[in-house]
Image: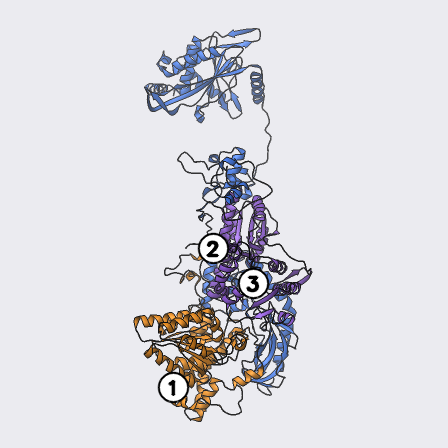
């Protein structure tokens, strides 16, 4: 962890609002995500995880603060950088790690991988791979809530890179037009892969785009878990009680590359170090210690627990079996496709069930 | 406790990495998340951050050196920790990895080829990945080896299935062709066009594109697959049908070696048996030619028959007669006596004798200057022996009634078989009967057996539909063909004889007189 | 002849064509400052500057359309799709504008544009990122579709695509970017579009493949040879228009065909080939045309399931034996 010259802390007012117990919980959640992601990186380097692997390191404050402001009945959806959201919405570290390794014990039974974690029981409707492609889905969840007048809220996360897709504009217009209970959260980590915001968006104050749809817009420091929590709480209330959508820009930073194979040469080490000084975990830690809401030993203990949980998940995942080949034809339609195993080995006869 | 850091995989397609620069000197401190080294992957130079805290005790790979994934690159530990021995050991490993670095890629390629071929090594999940993936990640095999026991069990199950049964390949999967209109550009302008399918028969060429496709020598003019007696379409490939049509081969007579009996081109071309060989079927060895010594008897047969066929101008008269009553008579006769089992041929011979008595001009022979009309019917009949054909002669057959004639035939045939015939027993026939009915032969022609001028070739009595009073009913027929020496017997004479003979056959009671 | 990787060969093709023709420019996500998501455009920004190497936001539909518009008024864009999975967002522009402009205007416009990028499954990227899209584009009259199998072909075909006056979909393979092969240095190394290539001559069975699938085909042909089956291997190179002449010449000789593709079977490349072959060459066939494809389902993530979905050399061998009646 980078050294900081003076101990930055979370916003005082928001911290008061969040309170001791909740903030202690937030720190533990952030630690779990951090340690889990570090472990995932390690497993990727060793070859046990393949494919794309987008780590959430640095952005933990956004998901933890935001989801901490929701009720269990509310809906959550995000893009492909989804490990953290999954962990917060009931996917166990074991299930997420097993999914990363393509095991049958994974959160999507080994079918989805890093970008596609799901837990419908806790209304986590997945990680999605096509930039911006899930924003209409979120709007659909909100539509269903309004349709059934249930009073639940949809929280939709996406990166600032997704805002330039047509799906963003079309969805937000509908949400405002139809008074849908949705909260759209831009996780602005400054880079769409290697492209900085300045080269991708004509304006830098992204929440301003809300004006175009006639909805509320708000900017929040995504590195401060307490501010995120307070901000999302306001937006969720607006959605639940006033049936109005909100667009929120959470300014954050990812400490790692876009994916494991991204060398991240588009930014300087100094820039990264500066951002690391505002590590959401550091901020929360200092806040708790300063207010004596937690002891150093406690924080260290939670961190060790997080490491242990990540290590346990890795071990579990490695030991888990791959999905059975005989189940290959499942989950394509409601009825499993009736390939026999030997058929499955010869693709030229794999036709029409 | 020292930690060995290995060359990490920093991209999914990376197989080896180069140390671009070390960020930490030996003896320097590093903590988790801090840059340890720059590593050049196949795509880019990446900063590799340490997963652990500690002091860098040794660098095992120099800047600029390339090693495969998983090769130790440095050692982390506590300050002052003695790792001298470990480092020596690891350095040897690194050298070995470097030396094998190039061949590593080749080995990967080999594995690919093997997986591609049919070797089912079943070496963990990695082997299942198919040719390409195997080559993609050098770490593949390791990944496979590391998967847990459960995964191994699954792999075993797969291997069993694969070994147990070759995947069934339904090459009959329906071709869902619903529209005859050719996809644009199906035009086929190949140099060698199909020989001569009739232009007129190119149905379905309704669009210019389709017409163009058809004129490229397409499917028009291919004869339809024939149907068997039950109306079942013979299964034959288009090519086999074309080749059969070109060569005049009846597909009904060809046995198909393809799936579900499909006739394929190999079946109509008589290609080498290799095409039909299947695993587990013992190969039938080709027999070498062999020579058989020509016996005296065979020489005689050859000489006499060549002489007959070359000097006697043969013509043939065939008749088909109703044979129910002949068959009935035979049955009754054999019920009425047990002296000898009378055969149909015995009855036919008896009929021939009676007919010859009415047509002495047929019971005759050519003797260059004269025609001899024989006073007696010296009735020859053909007996097939393993060593050749012989025709014993019943002398003065007109003296014998049916049963006596049958007894005489049995006696002579028996002697023929045990080789005790004397020359006079098989020479001097005035007429001859040859019967292949016992082989199911319906109709054949025989070569005249001198000195007789005629020989009767008799086919089987067979069940057949017959018309009686305008009604179709089940009956019995037999066909006989008289070979005549035109020098002795003219057509009308032969025909008249056959008419008489037929009357005896169809009203056989007179045979008993 | 130089030995180059696939990505270097493609890079060289773009470089040479940009040097040759001022109207040629490259546009797409991460093509410039990032030097290409897969490093195919490496160094081009440095050489040609931001005017001719244009980074875009994540806006596939729009930058596809921007390219088409620019091509209608005289430029010759190369549009890089980071992967063709993302090109699905741009289909409206490509299908409705690029493919139809010439006809709708009665021949007054043409759209000399290339859409290029990686296509098909790489390794463990799951359902949304593993799609072989070639048959979708092949279905659209007005488009040409090219998919090279070697670095040398990649260069020659990409140069031809850039010089072509019609819209060309140029499909690469992510997992082949590192493949190394002989690449002619000649500036005029331009391969004709619409021509297939006989990679290996044989007399017993015709194996038709392209792009990454050709590797399995070649490996299968080698294995089959040891087994006494002499396979002829055809690399299609261009999927639309199809070179039926080369295929017909081969089928008249071998009487048996196996087609290989990494896409789905329904309405796939093999389906089209099978139709055309049976229609034009019916009486030359001694066995049904048989296709080897990806399994008919979305790609699962797990390594073993993915491997079971993708066709490999073993499948090609099995199919070739089946059509040769050598089961």
- Which label number is shown at residue C116? 3
Q: Considering depth in this image, is C33 or B107 the residue closer to the camera? A: C33
Whether pointer 2 and pointer 3 mark residues with C-beta atoms closer than 8 Å, the reply is no
On residue A55, which mark appears?
Answer: none
Whole-number angstrom distance, CA of label 1 to CA of label 3: 50 Å
Q: Please state if A178 lies on the left or on the right of C204 as rendered.
A: left
- Distance from Cα at disc 2 to Cα at disc 3: 23 Å
SS class, disc 1: helix
Would you call the spot at circle 3 few (<14 residues within 10 Å), some (14-19), or many (20 or more)? many
Q: Nearer the viewer, residue B96 or C202?
A: C202
- How many C-alpha atoms fall within 10 Å of the one at disc 2: few (<14), some, or many (≥20)? many
Tell me the CA gap for discs 1 and 2. Answer: 54 Å
Nearest the viewer among A176 and C168 is A176
**Where is residue C6 shown, x and y percent of the image?**
61, 63
Residue pointed to by mark 2? C265
Residue where numbered disc 1 is placed? A22
Numbered disc 2: secondary structure: loop
Above or below A56: residue B469: above
Sequence-wise first label, 2 or 3: 3
Residues packed near mark 1 inside 10 Å, few (<14), some (14 to 19) or many (20 plus): some
Which x, y percent locates residue C271? 49, 51
- Classify residue B98 by image quadrant: bottom right
Q: Look at the image and give the colour of chain B.
A: blue
Labels 2 and 3 in the same subunit: yes
């Amino acid at each position: 962890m980078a050294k900081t010259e003076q101990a930055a802390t979370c916003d005082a007012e928001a911290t008061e609002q969040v309170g001791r117990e909740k903030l202690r919980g937030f720190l533990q959640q952030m630690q779990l995500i951090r340690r889990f992601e570090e472990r995932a990186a390690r497993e990727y380097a060793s070859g046990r995880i393949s494919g794309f692997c987008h780590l959430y390191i640095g952005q933990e404050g956004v998901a933890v603060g935001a989801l901490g402001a929701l009720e269990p009945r509310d809906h959550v959806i995000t893009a492909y950088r989804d490990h953290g959201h999954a962990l917060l919405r009931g996917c166990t570290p074991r299930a997420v790690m097993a999914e990363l390794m393509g095991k049958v014990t994974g959160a999507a039974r080994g079918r989805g991988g890093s970008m596609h974690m799901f837990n419908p029981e806790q209304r986590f409707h997945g990680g999605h791979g096509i930039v911006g492609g899930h924003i209409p889905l979120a709007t659909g969840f909100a539509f269903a809530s309004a349709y059934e007048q249930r009073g639940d809220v949809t929280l939709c996360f996406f990166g600032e890179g997704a805002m330039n897709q047509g799906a963003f504009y079309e969805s937000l217009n509908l949400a405002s037009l139809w008074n849908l209970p949705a909260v759209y959260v831009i996780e602005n980590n400054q880079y769409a892969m290697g492209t900085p915001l300045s080269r991708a968006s004509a304006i830098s104050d992204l929440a301003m785009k809300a004006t175009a749809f006639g909805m509320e817009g708000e900017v929040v420091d995504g590195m401060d878990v307490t501010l995120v929590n307070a901000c999302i709480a306001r937006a969720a209330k607006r959605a639940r009680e006033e049936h109005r959508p909100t667009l929120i820009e959470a300014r954050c930073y990812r400490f790692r590359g876009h994916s494991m194979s991204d060398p991240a040469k588009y930014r300087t080490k100094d820039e990264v170090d500066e951002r690391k000084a505002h590590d959401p975990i550091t901020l929360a830690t200092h806040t708790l210690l300063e207010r004596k809401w937690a002891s150093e030993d406690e924080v260290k203990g939670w961190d060790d627990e997080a490491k242990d949980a990540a290590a346990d998940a890795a071990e579990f995942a490695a030991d888990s079996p791959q999905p059975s080949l005989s189940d290959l034809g499942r989950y394509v339609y409601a009825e499993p496709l009736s390939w026999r195993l030997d058929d499955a080995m010869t693709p030229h006869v794999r036709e029409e069930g | 406790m020292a930690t060995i850091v290995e060359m990490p995989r920093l991209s999914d397609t990376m197989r080896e990495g180069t140390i671009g620069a070390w960020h930490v000197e030996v003896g320097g401190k590093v903590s988790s998340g801090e840059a340890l080294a720059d590593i050049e992957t196949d795509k880019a130079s990446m900063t590799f951050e340490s997963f652990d805290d500690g002091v860098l005790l040794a660098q095992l790979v120099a800047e600029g050196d390339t090693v495969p994934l998983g090769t130790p690159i440095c050692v982390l530990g506590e300050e002052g920790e003695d790792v001298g021995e470990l480092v020596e050991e690891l350095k040897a490993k690194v050298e070995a990895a470097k030396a094998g670095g190039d061949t590593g890629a080749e080995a990967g390629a080999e594995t690919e080829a093997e997986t591609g071929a049919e070797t089912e090594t079943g070496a963990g999940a990695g082997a299942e990945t198919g040719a390409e993936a195997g080559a993609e990640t050098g770490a593949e095999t390791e990944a496979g080896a590391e998967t847990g026991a459960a995964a191994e069990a699954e792999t075993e199950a797969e291997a069993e299935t694969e070994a147990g049964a070759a995947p069934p390949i339904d090459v009959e999967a329906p071709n869902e062709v619903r529209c005859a209109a050719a996809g644009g550009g199906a035009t086929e302008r190949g140099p060698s066009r199909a020989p001569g399918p009739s232009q007129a028969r190119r149905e379905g060429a309704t669009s210019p594109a389709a017409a163009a496709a058809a004129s490229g020598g397409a499917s028009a003019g291919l004869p339809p697959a024939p149907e068997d007696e039950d109306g079942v379409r013979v299964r034959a490939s288009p090519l086999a049908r074309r080749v059969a049509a070109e060569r005049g081969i009846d597909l009904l007579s060809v046995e198909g070696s393809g799936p579900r009996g499909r006739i394929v081109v190999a079946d109509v071309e008589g290609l080498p048996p290799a095409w039909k060989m299947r695993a587990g079927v013992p190969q039938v060895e080709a027999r070498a030619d062999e020579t058989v010594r020509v016996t005296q008897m065979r020489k005689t047969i050859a000489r006499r028959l060549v002489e007959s066929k070359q000097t006697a101008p043969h013509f043939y008269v065939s008749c088909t007669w109703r044979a129910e009553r002949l068959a009935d008579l035979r049955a009754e006769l054999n019920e009425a006596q047990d002296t000898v089992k009378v055969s149909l041929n015995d009855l036919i011979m008896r009929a021939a004798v009676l007919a010859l008595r009415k047509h002495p001009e047929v019971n005759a022979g050519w003797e260059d200057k004269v025609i001899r009309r024989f006073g007696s019917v010296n009735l020859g009949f053909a007996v097939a022996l393993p060593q050749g054909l012989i025709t014993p002669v019943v002398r003065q057959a007109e003296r014998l009634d049916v049963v006596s004639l049958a007894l005489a035939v049995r006696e002579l045939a028996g002697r023929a078989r045990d080789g005790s015939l004397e020359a006079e027993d098989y020479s001097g026939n005035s007429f001859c009967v040859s019967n292949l009915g016992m082989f199911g032969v319906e109709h054949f022609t025989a070569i005249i057996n001198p000195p007789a001028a005629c020989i009767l070739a008799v086919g089987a009595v067979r069940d057949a539909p017959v018309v009686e009073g305008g009604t179709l009913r089940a009956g019995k027929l037999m066909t006989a063909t008289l070979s005549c020496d035109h020098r002795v017997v003219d057509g009308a004479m032969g025909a008249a004889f056959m008419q008489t003979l037929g009357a005896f056959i169809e009203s056989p009671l007179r045979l008993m007189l | 002849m130089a030995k180059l990787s696939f990505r270097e060969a493609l890079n060289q093709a773009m470089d040479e064509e940009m040097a040759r023709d001022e109207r040629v420019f490259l546009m797409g996500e991460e093509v410039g400052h990032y030097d290409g998501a897969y490093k195919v455009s490496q160094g081009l920004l440095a050489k040609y500057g931001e005017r001719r190497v244009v980074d875009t936001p994540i806006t596939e539909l729009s930058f596809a359309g921007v390219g088409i518009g620019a091509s209608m008024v005289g430029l010759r864009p190369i549009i890089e799709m980071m992967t063709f999975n993302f090109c699905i967002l741009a289909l409206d522009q490509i299908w409705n504008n690029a493919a139809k402009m010439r006809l709708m205007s009665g021949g007054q416009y043409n759209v000399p544009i290339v859409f290029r990028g990686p296509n098909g499954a790489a390794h463990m990227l799951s359902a949304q990122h593993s799609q072989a899209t070639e048959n979708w584009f092949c279905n659209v009259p007005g488009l040409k579709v090219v998919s090279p199998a070697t670095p040398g072909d990649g260069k020659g075909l990409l140069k031809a695509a850039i010089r072509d006056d019609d819209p060309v979909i140029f499909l690469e393979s992510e997992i082949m970017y590192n493949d190394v092969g002989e690449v002619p240095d000649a500036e005029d190394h331009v391969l004709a579009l619409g021509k297939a290539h006989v990679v290996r001559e044989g007399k017993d069975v015709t194996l038709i493949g392209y792009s990454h699938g050709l590797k399995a085909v070649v490996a299968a042909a080698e294995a089959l040879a040891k087994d006494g089956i002499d396979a002829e291997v055809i690399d299609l190179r261009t999927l639309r228009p199809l070179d039926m002449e080369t295929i017909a010449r081969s089928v008249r000789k071998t009487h048996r065909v196996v087609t290989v593709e990494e896409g789905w079977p329904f309405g796939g490349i093999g389906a089209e080939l099978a139709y055309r072959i049976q229609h034009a060459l019916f009486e030359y066939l001694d066995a049904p045309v048989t296709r080897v494809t990806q399994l008919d389902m979305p790609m699962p993530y797990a390594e073993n399931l993915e491997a079971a979905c993708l066709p490999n050399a073993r499948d090609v061998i099995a199919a070739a034996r089946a059509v040769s009646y050598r089961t």
